[in-house]
Image: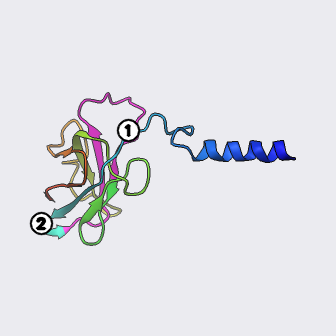
Amino acid sequence: MVVMLFMVGLLWLWGCSSNSPGTENQKPVHPVMGSVTVGGKPAVAAFILFTPVNEPPDSKQPRPRAEVKEDGSFAISTYGTEDGAPVGEYIVTIVWEDRDVGDRLKGRYSDSKTSTLRATVKEGANDLPPFKL
């Protein structure tokens, strides 16, 4: 019984450690906040995706992403909710879907190969300049 409790305790500690399975490849992230407006109004529910400039497209690393809130603001998530993004240069894509008309931005910012939007994430808190579309 004591051995079993000891083993359960070890498993619990191993699961809580920063080296638990699935976390060994995670890059450190830093808070990233910004806003998106279209014609001066919040792009509510637009989807934002950050694609690292120097990372191959077939990379298995999660992509930093966010959804625009009612006030036009967003906070980037990579591994958890609003945890931020790794340091680096990013191509920013934005899609603002409407079930009646499709992408309200007409695909202008939906492809990382053609989007002109960029973001730089540095160590520490990052408050990006607004994306005014």
Picture residue at 23% right of the left edge, 67% below the top: 72
Q: Please state which of residues 69 and 43 is positioned toward the viewer in this rendering.
A: 69
**Seen in the image, is 93 located left or right of residue 14?**
left
Q: Residues within 10 Å of mark 1 (few under 14, many from 20)?
A: few
Instruction: Answer whether residue 56 is magenta in the image.
Output: yes
Q: Which amino acid does the dot numbered 1 rest on?
A: Lys
Q: Which amino acid does the dot numbered 2 rest on?
A: Gly
Element type where label 1 sits in the image:
loop
Instruction: Answer whether residue 47 is magenta in the image.
Output: yes
Q: In the rendered image, which quarter contains the C terminus?
A: bottom left
Of callouts 2 and 1, the N-terminal one: 1
Residue 51 location in percent, x, y?
Answer: 28, 40
- Report the residue marked by disc 1: 27
Q: Quadrant of residue 122?
A: top left
Residue 114 location in percent, x, y?
Answer: 18, 39
Q: Residue furthest front?
A: 2
Q: Quadrant of residue 53?
A: top left
Residue 24 location in percent, x, y?
Answer: 48, 35
Residue 108 location in percent, x, y?
Answer: 18, 48
**Seen in the image, is 25 located left or right of residue 54?**
right
- Report the residue marked by disc 2: 39
Picture residue at 76% right of the left edge, 44% below the top: 6
**Seen in the image, is 31 located left or right of residue 4?**
left
Element type where label 2 sits in the image:
loop
Q: Please state which of residues 30 and 35 is positioned toward the viewer in this rendering.
A: 30
Picture residue at 24% right of the left edge, 54% below the top: 125
